[in-house]
Image (cartoon, helix red, strand yellow):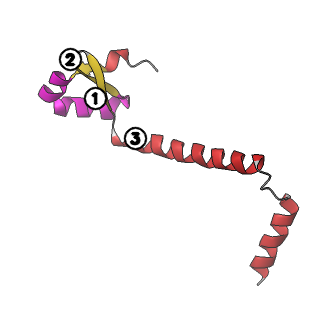
Amino acid sequence: MRYSSQVKPISYLKANAAEVLLQLAERREPMVITQNGEAKAVIQDVASFEDTQETLALLKILALGNQQIDAGKVKPIAEVAARLRAKRAR
């Protein structure tokens, strides 16, 4: 995704805050805010932010799982399934 079309100076954000919020919600694309010609912030709609946070959480879970595999902290599925069945039977 290219963000070059979504780069605005901070003065634009100040003058058009309500319009910017509508654009963010409609397009679901982040906007880069510049100050003195340099990128200073990125804003996005809440739904996109929540999606990003969920994706990051899933990636962290996968990374932790890979670390456990690398560390040898794994058990055969048959053993785990048997233990779960035993707990359910109680």
* Relative depth, front residue between 26 and 89: 89
- Nearer the viewer's eye, disc 2 or disc 1? 2
| Mark found first going from the N terminus, 2 or 1 | 1
The residue to which callout 3 is attached is 49
Name the quadrant containing residue 66.
top right
How many marks can you see?
3
Residue at 75% in and 77% down: 88
**Percent coordinates x, y for residue 24 in the rendering:** 31, 31
Query: In this view, which residue lies farthest toward the left?
Result: 15
The residue sitting at 86% across, 65% down in the picture is 79
The foreground one among 20 and 8 is 8
Residue 13 percent coordinates (x, y): 19, 27
Say what amino acid the circle numbered 2 marks: Asn
Q: Contact (CB < 8 A) between labels 3 and 1?
A: no
Local packing at callout 2 (Cα closer than 10 Å; few below 14, some 14-19, many 20+) is few
User: Which image quadrant is residue 73 in?
Assistant: bottom right
* Residue at 36 percent of width and 29 percent of height: 30
Residue type pointed to by label 1? Gln
- Pair 3/2: label in front: 2
Image quarter of residue 62: top right
Mark 2 lies on a secondary structure that is loop
Q: Bounds of the magenta span? A: 10-30
Residue visible at 38% across and 28% down in the picture: 29
Mark drawn on residue 36? 2
Q: Which amino acid does the dot numbered 3 rest on?
A: Phe
Label 3 to label 2: alpha-carbon separation: 26 Å
Q: Give the residue at mark 1.
A: 23
Q: Main secondary structure of the magenta part?
A: helix
Residue 11 is a magenta residue = yes
1 sits to left or right of 46 = right
